[in-house]
Image (cartoon, grey):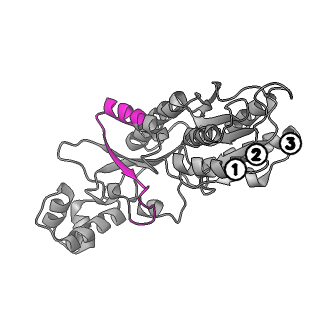
C-alpha cells in the first residue's frame, strides 16, 4: 500500500498540511475548490486515509439497485465485511456511469478497497477514477483483460444448460431475451443459447433474439406483447434475468397463452421474483450471497497482504425446475394452440 504522507499531498495540491487534514477528516471551513485540489492530489499520489477510529472501508459498486439480483451479493459483502469490522460504502452507477466519478472515490478517501459488479473497461470512468494503489475485485461481471481478481459463475455453461432443458422438453422455437450487448453476462449467455441450438440442429430465429437494455419488467412485458402478437411466435423463451422472464409470463397470459403449455419460460438468477411469479419460474440459481462473501474475503486478503491465492474463482450454478417449463404436448392434446 502507498506510504504517501499528508505533507506530500499538501505539497502536490499547493495547500497547507492543515488544509489536507481538514479535507480528509471531513471537517468544514474548506472551499470546494481547495477540497477538489486535495482530493485530486491524494488520489494521484495514492494516499490512503483512515477514519479517526482506524476502521477500514470497502467500496461496493452496483450497476442498478432496482435489480433484485444484487440484493444477496450486497448482503454477502456486508456480512463478510462485518466479521472484520469493515464498513461498506455503496455506490450505484444506474444514474449514469459516465456522468461523474464514483463518490466513494472522492468523498473522504476512506476506501481501502473496491468490489465492482459493474463491467469495467480501461477507458471507463470508474477505472480511471480508481485511486492509485487501491485493490479491486471483480464480482459477477468481469473483464479478463484487467489485472483484477474475479469471482463469478460460468455464464456460458449455465445458459447452455438452460436452453438444453427447454430443447429436451420438446421445445424447438426458442426466443432469447437479453439485456444490453455491452454486458458480458448477456454476451456469454447468448453464446450459450446459440451453441445449444446449433448442437441440437435447431435454427435461431434472429427476430426472436431481443436485447432490451435495462433489466426492467415493463420493458419485457412490452417486448413480449409484440413478440406474441406475431403470426408465428416461439414455444419457449430463455431470459437472462428472472425480471425479464416474469414480464414474458405476464404478457403471454394476458394474450391468452398458457404457461407452460403454450410457452415454456426459463429465467436466470433465482431471485424472489422467480418464486412469487405465477407460475413459479424455472431458472438458473446463481450463488449470489456466496459470490458476495468470496469477493469480500478476497478483497480483505488483498488489503492485508497484497495478494490472493486464486485470481479467478468460478462458483457453481444450478438449474431449478419449477412450473414455468414443461414437456410440449403432442398435437391433438389440449394446450398446444390458441385460436
Disc ID at residue 182: none
97 sits to left or right of 336: left
255 sits to left or right of 102: right
Q: Which residues are magenta?
A: 75-101
Residue drawn at the location 45% of the way across and 60% of the way down = 126
* Residues tagged 1 and 2 counted as in contact (Cβ below 8 A): yes
85 inside magenta stretch? yes
Comes first in the chain, label 2 or label 3: 3
Residue 180 percent coordinates (x, y):
60, 55
Mark 3 residue crowding within 10 angstroms, few (<14) / some (14–19) / many (20+): some
Which residue occupies the foreground of this view, 274 or 254?
254
From the viewer's perspective, is residue 215 above or below residue 30? Answer: above
Number of dots carrying numbers:
3
Residue drawn at the location 26% of the way across and 69% of the way down = 36
Disc ID at residue 227: 1
Label 2: which residue? 233
Which residue occupies the foreground of this view, 295 or 65?
65
From the viewer's perspective, is residue 278 above or below residue 127? Answer: above
How far apart in space, not on screen, are marks 2 and 3 (Cα)? Answer: 15 Å
Residue 202 percent coordinates (x, y):
86, 42
Q: Is residue 215 visible?
A: no
Quarter the C terminus occupies: top right
The residue lying furthest to the front in this view is 339
Residue drawn at the location 79% of the way across and 31% of the way down = 336
Camera-nearest label, 1 or 3: 1
206 inside magenta stretch? no
Comes first in the chain, label 1 or label 2: 1
Residue 65 percent coordinates (x, y):
42, 46
Label 3: which residue? 202
Tag 3's secondary structure? loop
Which residue occupies the foreground of this view, 169 or 88?
169
Amino acid at each position: 500500500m502507498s506510504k504517501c504522507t499528508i505533507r506530500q499531498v499538501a505539497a502536490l495540491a499547493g495547500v497547507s498540511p492543515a488544509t489536507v487534514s481538514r479535507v480528509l477528516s471531513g471537517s468544514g471551513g474548506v472551499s470546494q475548490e481547495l477540497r477538489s485540489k486535495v482530493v485530486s492530489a491524494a488520489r494521484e499520489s495514492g494516499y490512503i486515509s483512515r477514519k479517526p477510529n482506524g476502521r477500514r472501508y470497502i467500496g461496493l459498486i452496483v450497476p442498478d439497485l432496482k435489480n433484485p439480483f444484487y440484493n444477496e451479493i450486497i448482503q454477502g459483502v456486508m456480512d463478510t465485511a462485518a466479521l472484520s469490522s469493515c464498513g461498506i460504502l455503496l455506490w450505484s452507477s444506474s444514474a449514469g456511469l459516465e456522468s461523474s466519478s464514483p463518490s466513494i472515490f472522492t468523498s473522504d478517501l476512506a476506501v481501502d478497497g473496491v468490489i465492482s459488479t459493474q463491467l469495467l473497461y480501461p477507458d471507463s470512468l470508474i477505472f480511471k477514477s480508481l485511486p492509485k494503489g487501491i485493490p479491486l475485485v471483480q464480482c459477477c461481471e468481469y473483464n479478463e483483460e484487467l489485472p483484477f481478481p474475479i469471482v463469478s459463475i460460468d455464464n456460458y455453461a449455465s445458459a447452455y444448460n438452460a436452453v438444453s432443458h427447454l430443447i429436451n422438453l420438446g421445445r424447438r422455437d426458442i426466443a432469447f431475451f437479453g439485456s444490453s450487448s455491452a454486458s458480458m453476462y448477456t454476451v456469454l449467455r447468448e453464446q450459450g443459447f446459440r451453441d445449444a441450438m446449433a448442437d441440437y440442429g435447431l435454427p435461431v430465429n434472429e427476430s426472436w433474439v431481443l436485447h432490451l437494455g435495462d433489466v426492467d419488467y415493463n420493458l419485457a412485458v412490452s417486448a413480449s406483447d409484440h413478440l406474441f402478437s406475431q403470426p408465428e411466435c416461439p414455444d419457449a423463451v430463455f431470459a437472462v434475468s428472472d425480471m425479464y422472464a416474469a414480464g414474458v409470463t405476464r404478457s403471454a397470459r394476458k394474450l391468452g397463452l398458457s404457461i407452460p403449455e403454450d410457452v415454456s419460460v426459463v429465467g436466470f438468477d433465482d431471485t424472489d421474483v422467480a418464486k412469487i411469479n405465477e407460475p413459479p419460474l424455472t431458472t438458473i440459481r446463481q450463488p449470489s450471497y456466496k459470490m458476495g462473501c468470496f469477493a469480500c474475503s478476497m478483497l480483505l486478503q488483498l488489503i492485508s497482504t497484497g495478494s490472493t491465492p486464486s485470481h479467478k474463482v468460478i462458483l457453481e450454478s444450478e438449474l431449478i425446475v419449477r412450473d414455468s417449463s414443461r414437456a410440449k404436448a403432442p398435437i391433438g392434446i389440449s394446450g398446444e394452440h390458441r385460436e
